[in-house]
Image (spheres, grey):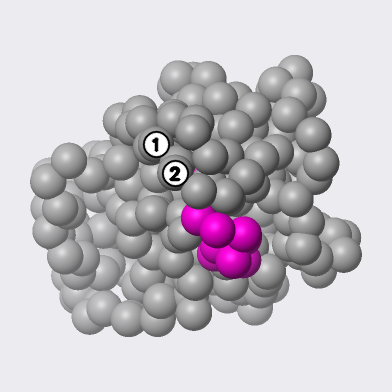
Amino acid sequence: MRLCSHLLIAGTLLALSGPASAMEFVTPHRQPTVVELFTSQGCSSCPPANANLIKLAARPDVLALSFSVTYWDYLGWKDVFGQPAYTQRQAVYEPRLGEAGPFTPQMVVDGRASAIGYDLREMQALIEASPPKSGPAISLGRERVDLGAGRPGRTGSDVWLVWFDPATVEVPVRRGENTGRTLPHSHVVHHLARLGGWNGEAVAFSTPATPKGLKTAILVQEPGGGPILAAATD
């Protein structure tokens, strides 16, 4: 198999004032390792990595997210989940990860390490090697997220809202490199938006109601494709 090689949605939401009440905070030592897969239904090399993400998603200590990129759409099949925002997110990662440019399939672990994603044992090793989270405790409430106080990144941190489908869905591909195949996908991201910034002080943000069938994840991350300092999902 050949390796397929080759904006973020702004939408800052209103910050809330006042403490959270009757809300459980997920402290850093309980937060999952974030594994992001950048994939495309138009790439013949991607199905093995998709299958590995499904296996990794079964781990309770992993938050798996599948981002469908758009730069292989020209091969004849437009990825039904693809969004330019996801393509841009991947492109922002590459300089910090030491990659020459975006490629699929690519798995990124906590914003710190990159791998092709073919080898499940390699991915498991990267997950085990990822250091503990150093960011804030996070609490997800109904249409609200609260961040505790803590140490921000060197230049502050971005707070990202992610909506994803936890189910495994089967997509029949009718054109392009995967013509005739039905490809399983899990933890597909359907929405990505920056809520605002975190500077080390406790803060709360309002969030839209999560669409039916989807789950919410919050990522606190150093800007410019830096490490993910905190993560939680409902």
- Quarter of the rendering occupied by the N terminus: top right
Q: Is residue 153 magenta?
A: no
Report the residue at 39% width, 54% height from top. Answer: 80
Q: Amino acid at mark 2?
A: Arg
Q: Nearer the viewer, residue 225 or 36?
A: 36
Q: Amino acid at mark 1?
A: Pro
164 vs 170: above or below: below
Left or right of 130? Residue 32 is left
144 vs 31: above or below: below
**Where residue 2 sits in the image (x, y, percent)?**
81, 41
State whether residue 111 appears in this view. yes
| Mark 1 and mark 2: Cα distance apart in space | 6 Å
* Residue 196 sits in quarter: bottom left
Sort mark 1 into few (<14), some (14-19) or many (20+) by Cα contacts within 10 Å: few
- Tell me which segment is drawn in magenta: 66-77
**Residue position marked by numbered label 1 in the rendering:** 172
Sort mark 2 into few (<14), some (14-19) or many (20+) by Cα contacts within 10 Å: few
- Of helix, strand and loop, which one carries label 1? strand
Mark closer to the observer (1, 2): 2
Report the residue at 56% width, 25% height from top. Answer: 51
Report the residue at 78% width, 56% height from top. Answer: 5
Instruction: Using the image, tell me which numbered label, if any, was put on residue 107.
Output: none
Left or right of 135? Residue 3 is right
**Where residue 125 sits in the image (x, y, percent)?**
76, 24
Q: Nearer the viewer, residue 91 or 175?
A: 175
**Residue position marked by numbered label 2 in the rendering:** 174
**Where residue 88 sits in the image (x, y, percent)?**
58, 72
Report the residue at 77% width, 63% height from top. Answer: 6
The reply to whether the C-beta atoms of the residues labelled 1 and 2 are less than 8 Å apart is: yes
